Image: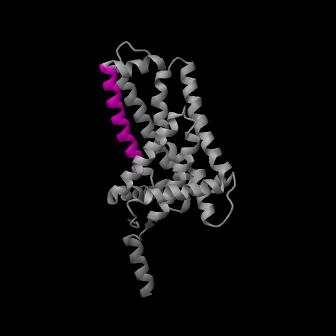
Amino acid sequence: MVKLETVRKDAPWTWLARALEDMKAAPLISLGYGAAFTAVGLAITFGLIAAGYGGFAPVLVGGFALVAPMFAVGIYRISEIRDRGETPGLFDFWSISGSRLTQLGLLSVLLFVFFLAWARLAQFLFAMLSGDSDFQLATLQNFLLTDPSGVLLLVVGTAIGALLAFAAFTVSALSFPMLVDRDVDAITALVASVKAVTTQPSVMIFWSVIIAVTTAMGAAFFLVGLAVTFPLIAHASWRAYKDFNPTPLPSAAELEAEAHRSEG
């Protein structure tokens, strides 16, 4: 079990404000991580366009956002080190203990499963509804906006993507920052994240909407805006984690063992 603090419903605005402070304290490192994240997205996009599969670019870039938390570990470290009153460094990511990296890797696999599910479902929907439309980006854009089947594909695909994105958010909102901060196992961190969403849904749904809108705004500027919005959301996610302050509670076996030690 995990104990969580109760947070205000308007807390996400505070998280964003404190995230800006984190970015101002280490702008080159924060924006550097954001630029690297954006570069990967651009490489995927231009690679698909060059190969004649530009129509798949929005699908894969959208799916790429599902695994964003595992790319934000270095940004969480910036906020963590600032909280200790120290100066963040570029390679602080590598100072994370091996046990924590292992647990982070396990959660990353789970997010990658969400990514693969999204890619497969998008491929299935495209095959069912696209008809003779090819994979060129311009052709797909015209198909989505003018053809009834294209509009249906856009609506259904967006709905499925939103559900998968919220599922990924539910398991990762607090879990990745928690694993960076504490020596806990991946299951405990995942439980903390799910509990935050299920027990305080109003604030977490509000936070997920802010993340979605901010990410969409960043992606709208040819993905370049993600260089700013990605680290902003990552720093804010760390602040969210600190506000909830998930604390693992001792198990029944641990309580019994402690009772025996006290009696002895």
Q: Is residue 77 visible?
A: no
Identify the residue at horizontal 57%, vertical 19% (top origin).
50
Q: Main secondary structure of the magenta part?
A: helix
Residue farthest to the top?
Answer: 132
Left or right of 32 on screen, residue 67: left
Which quarter of the rendered picture does the N terminus lie within? bottom left
Q: Nearer the viewer, residue 69 or 113?
A: 69
Left or right of 5 on screen, residue 77: right
Residue 106 position within the rendered picture, expressed as x and y whole percent measured from the top left: 49, 49
Identify the residue at horizontal 40%, vertical 59% (top origin).
10
Left or right of 241 on screen, residue 99: right
Residue 89 position within the rendered picture, expressed as x and y whole percent measured from the top left: 69, 55
Q: For residue 153: magenta?
A: yes
Q: Nearer the viewer, residue 91 or 62?
A: 62
Image: 125 above or below 69: above
Identify the residue at horizontal 39%, vertical 63% (top origin).
8
Q: In the rendered image, which quarter is residue 25 located in?
A: bottom right
Q: Which residues are magenta?
A: 148-169
Image: 189 above or below 263: above
